[in-house]
Image (tube, rainbow, N blue to C red):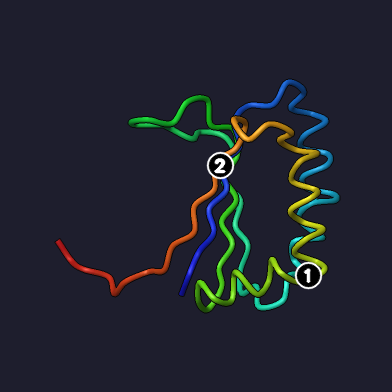
Amino acid sequence: MARMVVIYKTPKNPAKFDEHYFNIHIPMAKQLPGLKRYEVSKGAIVALAGATDPYLIGTLHFDSLDAIKEAFASECGRACAADRRVLAPNDDDVQMFLFDNLDAYSA
């Protein structure tokens, strides 16, 4: 399973951000080809190191990194990428990570 994690910094207008994110962006992103699951973490986000001012974290689950690339090469994926600019116009307002999960290891 591969994931895309998107971390948004606190926006200038949180109410406007939430309105757009939950009513426009998420429904659009849920149409991405190959998307298996979409999770949102908001509030009580604690940054232990490095991150500053996290507001919302979106996690998208796909079968593989190739599936993520294919999803964002689609018409829907290009629309989602463009819409992300409405939420975070500056690249400094968002962090994105793509990764493939390895098998879980017990401590």
Residue 73 in percent (x, y) is at 71, 69
Q: Residue at x 53, y 53 (%)?
A: 5
Determine which of the numbered discs, if any, sits on residue 7 in the image. Answer: 2
Disc marking residue 58: none
Residue 30 position, x and y percent, is: 74, 66
Label 2 secondary element: strand
Question: What residue is drawn where x is 79% and y is 29%?
Answer: 15
Packing grade of label 2 (10 A; few <14, some 14-19, many >=20) is many
Q: Which amino acid type corresponds to the residue marked 2 in the rendered image?
A: Ile
Amino acid identity at mark 1 = Gln
The front one of 94 and 45 is 94
Q: Is residue 64 above or below residue 12?
A: below
Position of the C terminus by quadrant: bottom left
Q: Return the x and y of residue 56 as percentages of the image width and height.
A: 60, 39
Residue beneath disc 1: 31
| 61 on left or right of 74 | left
99 over 9 or under it: above or below: below
Q: Give the residue drawn at x 83%, y 31%.
A: 16
- Distance in Å between CA atoms under marks 1 and 2: 20 Å
